[in-house]
Image (spheres, rainbow, N blue to C red):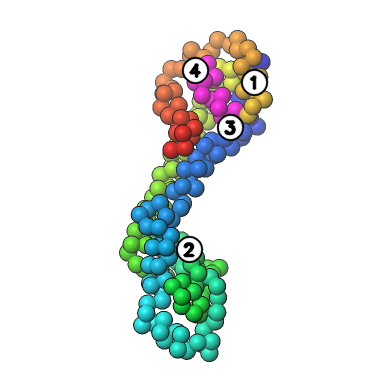
Amino acid sequence: MYLKPTQKLWESVAEKITGMYKDRLVYAADWYHYGLTKPQFDRIIAESIFPPEVDAKIQALGLVWFKQENIVTVAIHNGVVMDSYSIESNFGGRQPLVSPHWNSYSTATMPKCLDPRITQIAANRRAAQAKIVTEREEFSAKVKKMWDDAPSVNALVKIWPPILDLLPSHAAQAVQQKTTRRTAKQMSQNIDTAALSVHILKAKVGQ
């Protein structure tokens, strides 16, 4: 079946492209893929915002000046903006007392973790996420250009078969029934289909 590369069909392709990178972005967003386990990470943050000498005073003043909260959310600068991260406020067995002025809704009013081990991880995490997003956007732009230049989806499939993985199932099945257009050879000029296929392969193997 002959299919036109419509905007509506492109939106389905674009959604598939976004999905291709989802697992990699989830992995990159995990704080514990950058050299520290969760207990190590949480301990450094707890020691940063509740150093022993300060926490001793907090505990001595108790509920007169502080409040009890199960979770405390801290702000961590990633080199560009502030990220937020939450730990249990009774970490290490301390009484879960926190400042009444701390607010988990805004990084401006959160306690700041300034430990260089944590801020470096935050920077590495941001860079890893940004790299994947840039790769996704560049790939999407290249596919979109081919899409806009294609006289038909059928022609696009002929010069770059992996596009089938990005089509909704009904469209992929329709195209595979029969392709009779002859403009694919013209389209194939100046298109690095091998480079584009690497992105499809990455998505399949989860890298």
Magenta-drawn segment? 156-167
Q: Which residue is mark 3?
A: 13
Residue at x 60%, y 28% (from the top left corner): 167
Q: Which residue is mark 1?
A: 173
By secondary structure, the bulk of the magenta-drawn segment is best described as: helix
Q: Is residue 6 above or below residue 40?
A: above
* Image height of 77 relative to 65, above or below: above
| Horizontal side of residue 98 vs 120, given as left or right | right
Mark 1: secondary structure: helix
Residue at figure coordinates x 48%, y 30% from the top left: 200
Task: Give the position of the C terminus as an image quadrant.
Answer: top left
The spot of residue 155 in percent (x, y) is: 55, 17
Q: Are marks 4 and 3 in contact (CB under 8 Å)?
A: no
Disc 4: CA contacts within 10 A as few (<14), some (14-19) or many (>=20): some
User: Does dot 4 land on a helix, a strand or a loop?
Assistant: helix
Question: Spatial distance from mark 2 to mark 3, Cα to Cα?
Answer: 33 Å
**CB under 8 Å between discs 1 and 4:** no
Q: Which residue is mark 4?
A: 159
Q: Residue 92: x and y, percent?
A: 44, 73
Distance between the alpha carbons at the discs numbered 2 and 4: 46 Å
Give whichever of discs 1 and 2 has the lower sequence position: 2
The answer to whether one can see residue 107 in this image is no
Q: Which image quarter holds the N terminus?
A: top right
Q: CA distance from mark 4 to mark 3?
A: 17 Å
How crowded is the residue under tag 2: few (<14 C-alpha within 10 Å), some, or many (20+)?
some
Instruction: Give the number of the mark in front: 1 or 3.
Output: 1
Asked whether the beta carbons under mark 2 and mark 3 sit within 8 Å of each other, the answer is no
Callout 2 amino acid: Ser
Reading the image, the residue beneath label 2 is: 84
Please rate how many residues cluster around mark 1, counting C-alpha atoms within 10 Å: few if below 14, some from 14 to 19, many from 20.
few
Q: Nearer the viewer, residue 110 or 89?
A: 89
